[in-house]
Amino acid sequence: MLIGKHGDLNILVDHAIEESEIWNKLVLEPSGHSVQVARAPRAEVRWLRPPLNMYKCNVHSSWINDTSMCGGSWIVRNHNGDAVFHAREAFLPTTNRIASELRCFLWALQSLKDLHFEDIEIWSDCAAAIEAVTDPMNWPRYHSYLDKISRITPGFRKIFFKLASPKANSVARDIAKSVTRDGRFRSYLAIGGPAWLHSRIEEDKRR
């Protein structure tokens, strides 16, 4: 990645440190009502199938800096590892990676609700965004996004927010990066998974 200004590099470093500090404090705890945030000392290092009768949604927001368009994606797979739906979106610039990821959470949740999913796991590799959903009172800067997320989550019967490693979240990451890296700004929602990532999805299924 080319970074044009030293300030942009400092922002990226600051957020990396912030997420690292949060990572070291992760535990398993409920966040109330139908929502649970499941976290562990180590992230899921490779993609694993969700439990029977649950769906797994990997989410990622590709953020470069506060002046560039952001890319968003989500992909839902069932307990057999089959891709059920996936979507891509281009977002206007936002202040930082955390805000971008929370906006991506909100977009994904709205889409999943419209598609009538009831039991879902949301997986992200942004530790800070997961922490903000867990403990919104300590993240007042993101109150607008967190308030909207808290309003939509009761619409699900079961919903879990979980932390994945970048490798375990790689399919969603590549879809989102196709916006920022390749300039694919056309948004869409499709049944199944993207054809160009078919082999990766099939490889995940075999695990």
Image: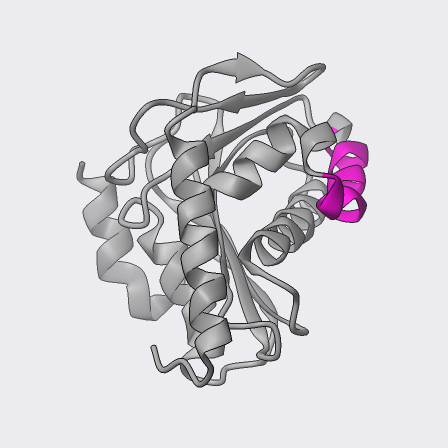
User: x and y percent of residue 191 in the render?
Assistant: 51, 57
Side of 129 where 34 appears, left or right: right
Residue drawn where x is 56% and y is 42% of the image: 129
* Residue 116 percent location from the top left of the image: 69, 38
84 left or right of 140? left
For the N terminus, the image quarter is bottom left
Q: Nearer the viewer, residue 85 or 62?
A: 62
Q: Which residues are magenta?
A: 140-153
| Front-most of residues 36 and 6 | 6
Residue lying at 18% horizontally and 40% vertically, measured from the top left? 206
Q: On the rendered structure, is 203 left or right of 195?
A: left
Residue 45 at what x, y percent from top left? 24, 37
Considering depth in this image, is 106 or 145 the residue closer to the camera?
145
* 46 versus 28 height, above or below: below
Would you identify the image quadrant in which residue 90 lies?
A: bottom right
**Image quadrant containing the C terminus:** top left
